[in-house]
Image: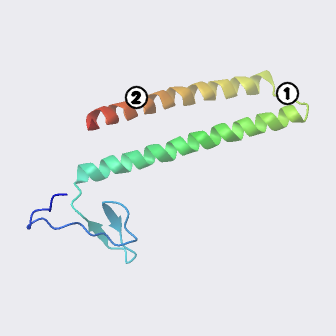
Amino acid sequence: MEKPAADVKPVIRPVWCLAPWCQAPTGRAYNLGVTDDERQEVHRLIEAHEQTVAVCRACAETTRDLAWEVKRGAAPTPDALGQTIAEAERVLAELGQVEIAIAQMKASLW
């Protein structure tokens, strides 16, 4: 393993800091060599993950609710099913865009 150059100092992060920049418990922001563009990209990725989790939650809740209705012997109205189908189509289109963005990010890295 190569030794780093003498003038290069390793970045040592406190235990509570898992990101390249972070907010200290004192409220003071630490920037450990991250550009504004990099920070914005990480922020965008975090928001995309939050949105993906929200979509997954909505799918799971809809599936659960539909299963409960069917288990009770009821069936959703055609209008309710139409709304569910429309929402599912919207989510699938959105996920398609997320898949494209992920492929583009991967391509830019390798």
Q: Residue lying farthest front?
A: 1
Badge 1: how crowded within 10 Å, few (<14), some, or many (20+)?
some
Left or right position of 40 against 68:
left
Q: Residue at x 81, y 25 (%)?
A: 77
What SS does tag 2 mark? helix
Percent x, y of residue 8: 12, 65
Task: State whether residue 58 is above or below residue 13.
Answer: above
Percent x, y of residue 69: 84, 35
Q: Are marks 2 and 1 in contact (CB under 8 Å)?
A: no
Left or right position of 48 against 42:
right
Q: Residue at x 24, y 49 (%)?
A: 37
Q: Quadrant of residue 101?
A: top left
Q: Residue at x 8, y 67 (%)?
A: 7
Q: Kindly identify which residue carries mark 1.
A: 75
Q: Quadrant of the C terminus?
A: top left
Task: State whether residue 44 is above or below residue 94.
Answer: below
Q: Kindly identify which residue carries mark 2.
A: 100
Q: Amino acid at mark 1?
A: Ala
Front residue of this view, candidates 13 and 21: 13
Q: Spatial distance from mark 2 to mark 1, Cα to Cα? A: 36 Å
Q: Quadrant of the N terminus?
A: bottom left
What SS does tag 1 mark? loop
Q: Amino acid at mark 2?
A: Ile
Percent x, y of residue 23: 36, 68
